[in-house]
Image (cartoon, grey):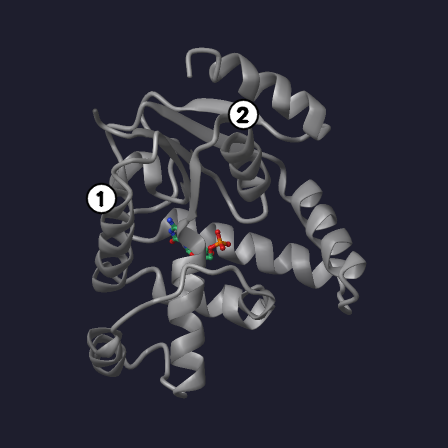
Amino acid sequence: MRNIIITIDGPAASGKEKIAKFISRKWKFKHLDSGLLYRRLALILLKDEINDRDLKKIKKRIEKIKKISFQKSKKLRTQEISQLASKIAIHQFVRQYVNNLQYNFVNKHKKIRGFVIDGRDIGSVVFKKADLKLYIEVNSEIRAKRRYKQLIDSGEKSIYRKILKDIKLRDKKDKLRKNSPLVIPDEAHIINNNYSFKNTIVQINKLMENF
Ligand code: C5P
């Protein structure tokens, strides 16, 4: 039997991860955060001081990667990595590399009942035949406020206006790029995450009734 695939797409800081974690815990599905893989690549390039415009070097460096960690880490969440991840994500060869990591991950875990995978192009490109597709909508000011609170709570210095600007910039990059832009996938259910998480969960529970 094929694994169940649930996709979650949406703009930066829209709460995809929190929703994915909720689904993963409640329905015992494995969570895969595709953004984390773009961030891992960004960290590798940053460490090796490879310029994001030097496509030849990026290609060569990617070819040399033997194994990439799927582990979450605080060092992947900095503004610098966020921006670099979004810069390199415009290139098709980078996207293909990350997509293959996702396919291999799913194929490797044949016995797992289901996966919940979040990103920008999961329902529209990577897993077009998913069993359930979600698209998360939240306005940019609310997203910036939530991200600001998160950073402050975790002890980091942060400026609300800078976060809002960064979120808007990443939205623009994600929506306007030629390769796999952020779109509402066909057949996706729109989740309104502007209000409380409780409110969001009610919407999710209704859609997940059949799983
Ligand atoms: O989701 P997260 O913010 O961690 O993703 C980091 C960056 O990677 C995003 O800003 C986006 O540009 C890119 N990304 C992407 N496609 C995905 C996941 C992330 O282009 N499926």
Q: Amino acid at mark 2?
A: Ile
| Residue 143: quadrant of the picture | top right
**Amino acid type, label 1:** Asn
Q: Residue furthest bottom?
A: 49
Which residue bears the numbered disc 2?
A: 191
Q: Which residue is mark 1?
A: 107
> Mark 1 and mark 2: span between their CA atoms?
28 Å
Q: Residue at x 24, y 47 (%)?
A: 108
Crowd class of label 2 (few under 14; some 14 to 19; many from 20; radius 10 Å): some
Image position, residue 129 (x, y; %): 24, 28
Q: Nearer the viewer, residue 101 or 189?
A: 101
Q: Where 111 falls versus 188 (above or below)?
A: below
Q: Residues within 10 Å of mark 1 (few under 14, many from 20)?
A: few
Give the quadrant of the C terminus.
top left
Q: Residue at x 29, y 35 (%)?
A: 111
Q: Position of residue 35 (x, y in %)?
A: 43, 54
